[in-house]
Image: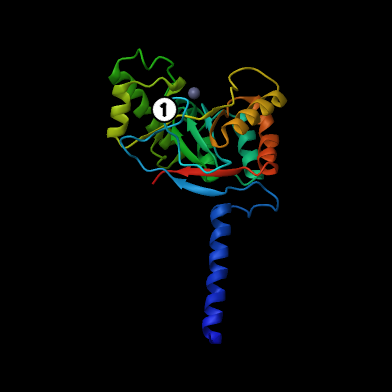
Amino acid sequence: MNHYLLRKRASLYALMALTALLGAAGAGAAPCPPGALGTHRVQVVAPDPAARFGLKSYDKTLPLGEKEVVLTFDDGPLPGPTDAVLAALEKECVRATFFLIGRNAKAAPHLARRIAEAGHTLANHSMTHPWTMRQMDHDAAWRNIMEGQAAIESAAGKRIAPFFRFPGFADTPALLESLAGAGIVVMGTDIWASDWNVMSPERQLRLTMRRLERAGSGIVLFHDTKSQTAAMLPAFLRALAEGGWRVVHIVGP
Ligand SMILES: [Zn+2]
């Protein structure tokens, strides 16, 4: 091989390395600090009429390898805990998915934008988080879902991923059909952190790690509105790094 080709190949490798670095750190973001957990890979989740993921509600989940985890945060944004969650994720260079409530995004649009600017995935968790979607009139429930999406997009200033998580996982066959028709993926979860129960950050860390170890991989559900979750997150991300777990960032097509 002549020198020209060697040089060309060397610059190609340099470009590939740079692209990988930028991909991991995000456009405009600082490079990942050495030793940070980082985001292992990006998984594109395309809409599909049968695309319902999460073993807590459905019979299949995302195609994850051994020790791969998807981090999801529901119910935000909420000034305070959401800020702390974002700081912990940034420190470890980790990308997550936030299922926002439209009403909360409207109340704290700066946080919706911050989540978007940090490169996380924004998704819809309805406008007002009704617990009673199974009892609601279909059209009223559908309106609540669509209003949520519009409010989050307006607050964040960008289109969100076509992912929806039912409040309290209370789906209905008719809403599942409407979501599939609209090209929206229904995202359940595989592992609960059960952070709706009040407990110390230490206890929550032990509980979540135990469930994760038992499952071997999966989508983990947290709430970025809970200060106990925000408090345990730095230790949780360290435990993932030390245990050889790999974070998968899910994105829309
Ligand atoms: Zn919720």
Q: State the colouring used for the structure image.
A: rainbow
Does residue 35 sit above or below 130 in this rendering?
below
Q: Outermost residue, bottom direction?
A: 2
Describe residue 173's horizontal placement relative to residue 11 as left or right: left
Q: Nearer the viewer, residue 143 or 187?
A: 187
* Callout 1 crowding tier (Cα within 10 Å): few <14, some 14–19, many ≥20: some
Q: Nearer the viewer, residue 152 or 121?
A: 121
Does residue 46 sit above or below 20 in this rendering?
above
| Image location of residue 85, percent across then percent down | 62, 35
Does residue 27 sit above or below 9 in this rendering?
above
| Image location of residue 6, percent across then percent down | 55, 81
Describe residue 142's horizontal placement relative to residue 240 as left or right: left
Question: Mark 1 belongs to which amino acid?
Answer: Tyr
| Image location of residue 168, percent across then percent down | 46, 20
Q: Which residue is mark 1?
A: 58
- Regarding residue 80, the answer to whether it shows in the image is no
- Regarding residue 174, the answer to whether it shows in the image is yes
Residue located 60% across and 22% down the image = 195
| Image location of residue 77, percent across then percent down | 53, 30
Q: Secondary structure at mark 1?
A: loop
Residue located 63% across and 44% down the image = 90
Residue located 60% across and 30% down the image = 214
Does any atom of ligand 1 lie closer than 8 Å to the CB of label 1?
no
Q: Nearer the viewer, residue 212 or 86?
A: 212
Describe residue 46's horizontal placement relative to residue 112 as left or right: left
Q: Outermost residue, top direction?
A: 135
Count of marks, rendered view: 1
